[in-house]
Amino acid sequence: MHGFGGRFQPEADQVTLAHLKSGQSGTVVDIQGGRRMTDRLNALGIFPGKKITKTSAMLMQGPVTIEVDRVEVAIGFGMASKVMVKPDRAP
Amino acid sequence: MTRILLMGNPNVGKSVLFSRLTGVQAIVSNYPGTTINYTRGHTKLGEETAEVIDVPGTYTLEPTSEAEEIALRLLDSGDIVINVVNAINLERNLYLTLQLLEKGIPMVVALNLWDDTRHRGIDIDLEKLEKLLEVPVIPTVAVTGQGVKELVENLPRAISPQRPPATRDQRWATIGKIIEQVQRIRHRHHTWRERLEDASVKPASGGLIALAILAASFFVVRFIGEGLINYVLDPLFNTLWAPVILKLSQLMGGAGFLHDMVIGKIAGGELNFLESFGLLTSGLYVPLGVVLPYVVAFYLVLGILEDTGYLPRLAVLMDTILHRLGLHGYAIIPNLLGLGCNVPAILATRILESKRERFIAATLISIAVPCAALQAMIFGLVGARGIQYVAIVYGTLFIVWIILGLILNRTVKGFSPELLIEIPPYRLPPWRAVLQKLWLRAYGFLAEAIPIILGAILVINVLYILGVFDAIANFTAPVVTGLLGLPKEAVTALVIGFLRKDVALGMLAPLALSSGQLVVGSVVLAMLFPCIATFVVMFRELGWANMLKAAGVMIVAALVTGGILNLIL
C-alpha cells in the first residue's frame, strides 16, 4: 500500500518497530518484508492496522518485544526494522 | 473408527486437554512448540470408541515450520476437529478457527483457559460467539478438568457450517466484527506478575534474572543429585546390595567367564560398583545409582522452568548470542533439553524454521551438549578429582559450542530466519503436572537405558575375552596415545561410547588415569560419536547426507579439542 515510498523515504510520522521507543504504542502501517516474513507476522496477528505497544528492546540489536492483543511477542531486530509503525503521539 | 483431532494455536493447552480426554500422559509445558509430533489416544464417544490425536500447535494452515506441516497433513485424516482456543487471546486464535471452518470438517470449539478471562478483565459472550461461528463453543479449563465432560457431550453436535474460502484480509475483517460483538475488555491495573514479566525481558534486569535462575538451577540439580546419591542410593547399594553380590561371587567360585560377566572383577575382596563391570554390579549401579539421581534432579528443575513460562524469555535474552552461531534465540530450548538427553533435543529442533538452523542446532547439540547420563558420570568420576576439573570439562565444551557455532554459521550455506515467538504469561507450575512429567521422563530413561546398558556390558565382556579390544587398541594407538595422550586401552571406552556414554566413561575408571587424562577422556567422549539412539534420530531428522556431515565435523572437532587439551594439561 505504500510501495516504494515506504521503503526508501519513510514518512515523517512513521518509525520502524526497531526504533520505536520502549513503552510507546502505535499502529502498524506497513510490513516491508517478503512473503514469508509477512506470513509469519500475520500468523501472530501482526499486520497493517494493528495496534501494538513496544514493551522492551534488548541491547546490541537484540529482539524487540511488543504487546499485541494482550499477548507478548518477541521479534528479531532485523524483522522489527522492516515493520513500520505510526506512533500514537508524535515522539 | 471416528478420528478426533485436537487443533489450535501453540501453547493453548491441547496436550492437557488430550490427557484429560484419553488418560494418555503427554509432555506438557508452558511454551509454544512443546508437542512436535502427534500423539494418539482413545476416548469413549457414546457407545463407540473414538481415536483422539493431539496435533502440534499451529497458527495458520499455511505452515511456516515442520511442526505446522505435520498439523496440516493430519487435518485431512480427521472426522471431527476440536479447535482449542485461548480465551485470553480470542482475536489471533480465531484466525485458525476460520481457516478450519473453511475446510468443511465438523468442528467444536473448546474455549480453554476460561478461568483466566475473569481476572484478566475479559468478558466473552458465549451464546453470541456460538451463533457467529455456527459451531458449538464450550468453555473449558483443561488443567482442572472443568468443562471437559460438556465438551465430550457436545462432540456429536459437531457440524461444518460450510464457510466459503476467504482471503487473509477478509478473515481478519470477519474476526474484527466478531470481536466487536462478543468481547468486552475491562480496564485494570498492572499486577506484580506483569511487572516481573516485563523485567524478565529488559536488558539489565533480564540478564540478572537469567543469571540468578541458571545459577540456582545448577545448584539445585547438583544438590538434589548429590543428595540422592549420598543419602539414598549409595547406602542402598553398599549396605543391601553389596553383601548379596559378595555372597553370590563366593557361590560362583570367585572367578571364571560367567562370574566376570555377572559380577565382574572383584579386586582383593573389595567391591567397586563402578569398576567391576558385571551385569549385576556396574550394570545396575550406573543407571540406578549414578545416573538416575541426576536425571530426576535435572528433569525436576527443567520441568519447573518449562511450566512457569521462563524459557521463551531466556530465548529473547540469548537471541543476540545465538544469532552469531547461525541460530536464533528459540534454539536455546532444544539445547537445554540436550542437557537431559540428546534424542528429544534433536527432535525439538523441529520448532526451528529452516533446514540450516536444524542442521546447526543438531550438530552443536550432539557434539557439545552432554546429556544427563554423561554429566552424572562426569560429576562422579571427574568430580572425585576436584571440582576444578569438572569446570575444565564444562568450560571446554562451552567454548567448543561457541567456536563450532561461529564456524558453522560462516560455512553452512543459506541464512537463518529471525526470532519470532509468542511469549506466554508466567504461571505457577501445577505441581501434579510437574511431577507427572518428571515421572514420564525418568521412567522413559530407565526403560531405554537399562536394556542398552546391560547389553553394552555384555558386549564389553565378550569383546574383552575375544581380544577384539586389544586389536583395536593397537590399531588406534597412534591417535589415542600420540594425539590424546591416553593409554591405548582408553579406545575401548570411545568405542563403547557409541552404545552408552555413561558406561563408556565408567570404562575409564579402572585405567588409573591422571586427572588431566581423565579430563581429556571425558571431553573427547562427550564430543565424539553420539550414542546410537542419537545417531538414529539424527539420521531420521536430518537425512543421511547431513548426518554424515555432522559426524565428520564431530570427529575433527573431538580430535582437535582433545589434542589441544592434551597439550595444555
Image (cartoon, rainbow, N blue to C red):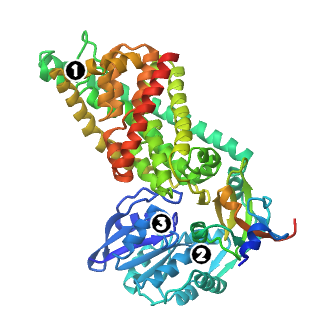
Mark 3, residue position = B57
Same chain for mark 2 and mark 3? The answer is yes
Give the residue type that dot 2 points to: Leu
Q: Secondary structure beneath disc 3?
A: loop
The residue pinned by badge 2 equals B90
Question: Where's residue B562, x and y in %?
Answer: 45, 24
Of pointers 1 and 3, the one earlier in the residue sequence: 3
What separation in Å lies between label 2 and label 1 (alpha carbons)?
Answer: 67 Å
First reached walking from the N terminus: tag 2 or tag 1: 2
Residue toward you, B354 or B221 = B354
Q: Residues within 10 Å of mark 1 (few under 14, many from 20)?
A: few
In the current view of this chain or complex, which residue is farthest to the top?
Answer: B268
Res. B471 mark: 1
Q: Quadrant of residue B48?
A: bottom left
Query: Type of residue at label 3?
Result: Gly
Determine the image quadrant of residue B258.
top left
Identified by mark 1, the residue type is Ala
